[in-house]
Image: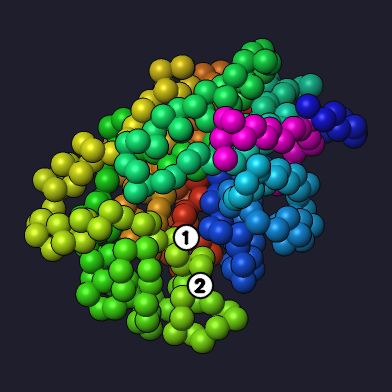
């Protein structure tokens, strides 16, 4: 890891950690993204789907963060912003392990803290929902590489967080509401065909990430194409035939891939949201029709014992409207009490 020199920090009694997928580089949505981050005010935040590091660094400067940018081998880079002194950090690139990357950051919380050093490992696992369960071995391989990185320093408490593109065992899903929305858009001409988007109604154009700033307002940007999953052609006629409701959701849920998230739980990591909300359906995406949780903050047991709160943020009120304009994911936030015992 790259050692970072600096003054010894004052003792921190708490640590707020967040994860946020900003969707396809942020584009013209960076002001909204920055407003969401400022409102949440995390001490450290992992950002997925960075394309150009410059707007991330500008946001960091305005909000008082140190910015770390990690380039991926192929696409969809990651970043970390930290207000906590960074003792060392490293960007892991391994094209044989994953198409993206992982940033490892060691935070210096002060020698007087009960836990003076904490490591962060960021993830953005393979999506490929059109491949259904066949992509889960890729996600397992990618998580396995990150766990091996963590094992190099087993004495340090750490957090693994980011976009897992996989569901946790026991989590529910609002599949029929989401698929029904896609079906409605298809009938109305929003989705001309599988993976293609046509004219967009006014209510959808109001979500800024649908608009292409360099084209007519009726056209849809490539960002929107990234925000709407590509589904097998058979899905759309099936949606018309299958009734919406909990029974159908349960059937769809049974088919969803869960092995990747289960592998962390089996390795002893604690799902912070489930620790604080054992039965809550707290969906992280998509913001236009919340249906599933695929963004997580996992902690080692020593950190999880000091977990105060964890939630999917910005889902209601004024901040929710801002979050819907900023990205197709809601951020996830966790608070830890690290004061001396």
The C terminus lies in quadrant: top right
Q: Earlier in the sequence, mark 2 or mark 1?
A: 2
State the image coordinates of residue 1 (x, y, percent, origin top left).
78, 27
Identify which residue is drawn at 65% across, 42% down: 73
Left or right, 94 with reference to 161: right
Residue 159: horizontal and vertical position, in percent? 58, 29
Residue 310 visible in the snapshot: no
Task: Pick the residue in front: 193 or 174.
Answer: 193
Residue located beneath label 1 in the image: 226
Q: Give the percent coordinates (x, y) of residue 81.
A: 70, 46
Residue 29 in magenta stretch: no
Q: Which residues are magenta?
A: 80-99
- Near-viewer residue (277 or 256): 256
Label 1 packing within 10 angstroms: few (<14), some (14-19), many (20+): some
Residue 47 is left or right of residue 174, and the answer is right
Q: CA distance from mark 2 to mark 1?
A: 9 Å
Instruction: Identify the mark at residue 115; answer none if there is no mark.
Output: none
Residue 247 higher or lower than 86, as above or below: below
**The magenta stretch spans residue 95:** yes
In depth, the one of 120 and 322 nearer the eye is 120
Query: For numbered disc 2, what is the local secondary structure?
Result: loop
- Residue 236 picture location, percent across and down: 21, 61
Q: Looking at the image, which residue is at 47% across and 54% down?
A: 330
Question: From the viewer's perspective, is 332 left or right of 53?
Answer: left
Q: Which residue is mark 2?
A: 221
Judge from the rendering whether residue 337 lies leftward or rightward of residue 137; answer left or right. right
Q: How many marks?
A: 2
Q: In the image as oriented, which residue stretches furthest toward the top? A: 155
Is residue 166 shown to the viewer in this render? Answer: yes
Q: In what element is the residue under mark 1?
A: helix
> Which residue is pictured at 51% across the width and 87% down the height?
216
Residue situated in front as seen by the camera: 327 or 190:
190
């Amino acid at each position: 890891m790259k050692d970072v020199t600096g003054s010894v920090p004052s003792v921190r009694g708490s640590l707020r950690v967040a994860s946020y997928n900003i969707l396809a580089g942020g584009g013209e949505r960076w002001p909204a993204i920055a407003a969401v981050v400022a409102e949440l005010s995390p001490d450290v935040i992992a950002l997925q789907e960075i394309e150009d590091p410059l707007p991330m660094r500008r946001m960091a400067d305005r909000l008082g963060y140190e910015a770390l940018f990690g380039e991926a081998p192929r696409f969809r880079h990651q970043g970390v912003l930290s207000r906590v002194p960074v003792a060392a950090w490293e960007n892991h690139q391994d094209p044989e392990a994953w198409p993206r990357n992982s940033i490892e950051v060691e935070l210096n919380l002060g020698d007087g803290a009960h836990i003076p050093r904490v490591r962060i490992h960021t993830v953005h696992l393979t999506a490929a929902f059109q491949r259904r369960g066949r992509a889960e071995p890729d996600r397992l391989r990618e998580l396995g590489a990150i766990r091996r990185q963590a094992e190099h320093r087993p004495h340090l408490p750490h957090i693994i967080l980011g976009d897992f593109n996989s569901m946790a065992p026991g989590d529910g899903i609002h599949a029929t509401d989401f698929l029904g929305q896609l079906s409605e858009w298809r009938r109305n001409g929003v989705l001309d065909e599988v993976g293609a988007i046509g004219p967009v109604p006014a209510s959808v154009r109001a979500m800024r990430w649908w608009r292409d700033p360099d084209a007519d307002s009726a056209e849809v940007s490539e960002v929107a194409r990234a925000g709407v999953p590509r589904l097998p052609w058979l899905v759309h006629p099936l949606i018309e035939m299958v009734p919406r409701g909990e029974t159908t959701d349960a059937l769809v849920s049974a088919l969803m891939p869960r092995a990747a998230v289960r592998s962390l739980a089996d390795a002893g990591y604690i799902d912070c949201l489930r620790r604080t909300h054992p039965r809550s359906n707290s969906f992280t995406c998509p913001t236009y029709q919340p249906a599933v949780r695929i963004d997580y903050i996992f902690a080692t047991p020593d950190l999880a014992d000091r977990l105060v709160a964890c939630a999917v943020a910005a889902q209601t009120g004024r901040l929710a409207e801002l979050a819907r304009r900023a990205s197709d994911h809601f951020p996830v936030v966790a608070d830890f009490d690290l004061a001396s015992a």
